Amino acid sequence: MQKKADQWSSKIGFILSSAGAAIGLGAIWKFPYMTGMNGGGAFFLLFIGFTIIIGLPLLIAEFIIGRGAQKEAVSAYKKLAPNSGWSIVGKLGVFGAFILMSFYSVVGGWVLIYSAMSIPGLIIKDSANYGELFATITGNPGITILGLGLFMIINIIVISFGIKNGIEKASKLLMPLLFVFFIVLVVRAVTFEGASEGLAFFLQPDFSKLTGDSVLYALGQSFFSLAVGISVMVTYSSYLNKDVSLPMSAGSVSIMNIFVSLLAGLAIFPIVFSFGLEPAQGPGLLFVVLPEAFAQMPFGELFLSLFLLLFLFAVLTSSFSMLEIITSAFTANKQRSRIKVAWIAGLIIFLAGIPAALSSSTLADFHLFGLTVFDASDYLVSNIILPLGCLLIALFITYKMDKALVKQEFFYSKDLAPGIYQLWFQIMRWLVPITIIIVFIGSLGII
């Protein structure tokens, strides 16, 4: 195997960085409000099922493709299936990452500005002001564009440093801290009066509240939260040595992702019901509800600032993966400077993200298919590009990629039972494609 110039320095660095790519807006921001808007516990149960049965096998598949080829997303498919046209999967991933990054960075900018404005002493700490503060940030064109720009600059700088000295160092420091502070928040949230109603909403499934769209959203959320479908994990695993078990690593990432999603629900929904707030209020849920909890805690202002800072880092570790797949695709031939490509890509994404940034202000009345630019971008990625990408990846690894190489990568570094491989392979060949097709067609009202 040809050793790449830039690789993960350790197994834990790879796992934490991969978890960081998955755990961010998907688990902490998007999951709670999607759960609130789709019936609570039933949606959560669907999400867990899709993550284990569909998302985890797909994550293993992306890891196998990336390490098997030792190439970034586009080049990996070219190397494993030359002259076959399958590189379209990697190109779709790069395009999906571009669209995703363009609106993801808008929310990242919200977090960045909100974190700065929540520093103790910078604004008046009145819990009634948090909803107004969030509305001010999202509704002000100048503030949203400033946040978008600053967020992109941070991403560009980290990606410019590369894998080991940029992404890995940041993830190994920040991800453990996020877990600690989240657990502290959950402990406080479940002690509020009326918290039991929120726990029941989140943990007791009511399947009568589910719709066809809810099932599609749950499937899309499992893809979004694991960062599968756009070949981000293909790129990440291409920097990985052979002494790491891919199924075990994928299992660790999936478990951490489900755990953080659980913590997010346990932290937010008890507070929502304790304060008489609406669980289906949408994207502002995290920015309005969490401050309510911290306002009731000793040293609440300090805890709020620290949590928002750590949440910002979790958001960043996810966005790093998106900019990395784009940057690596255009530096694969080693003829372009990583730093130069990162800055050019970052600038283009910034410009592309401006319409989404203005969706709550100047362009609030502009709609595409009945959706704002922000919501349309989200729908395109979560409900079309990610499922399509996952479907193509499942077909590629089971019908096109060399079976001996697939099996070899699956068993490297871990003596797993042969039956586990056979089960995974059959899931990828039959269950994953059929599930994606049925859910997608069902969402269109055809069946």
Image: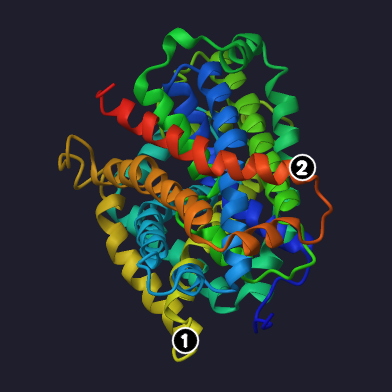
- Give SS at disc 2: helix
Report, in whole angstroms, how far the alpha carbon at label 1 lies from the one at label 2. Answer: 41 Å
Query: How is the protein colored in the picture?
Result: rainbow
The disc label shown at residue 333, or none: 1
Q: Quadrant of residue 370?
A: top left
Q: Quadrant of residue 300?
A: top right
The residue drawn where x is 56% and y is 63% is 402
Q: Quadrant of residue 185?
A: top right
Q: Quadrant of the N terminus?
A: bottom right
The disc label shown at residue 278, or none: none
Instruction: Return the residue at label 2.
Output: 180
- Give SS at disc 1: loop
Task: Classify residue 380 as left or right of residue 70.
Answer: left
Question: Can you say whether 445 is above or below 343 in the image?
Answer: above
Nearest the eye: 212 or 320:
212
The residue drawn where x is 70% and y is 56% is 410
The residue drawn where x is 37% and y is 35% is 437
* Residue 113: image location, x then y, percent: 47, 52
Q: Quadrant of the C terminus?
A: top left
Task: Classify residue 393 as left or right of residue 7.
Answer: left
* Residue 180: image location, x then y, percent: 76, 42
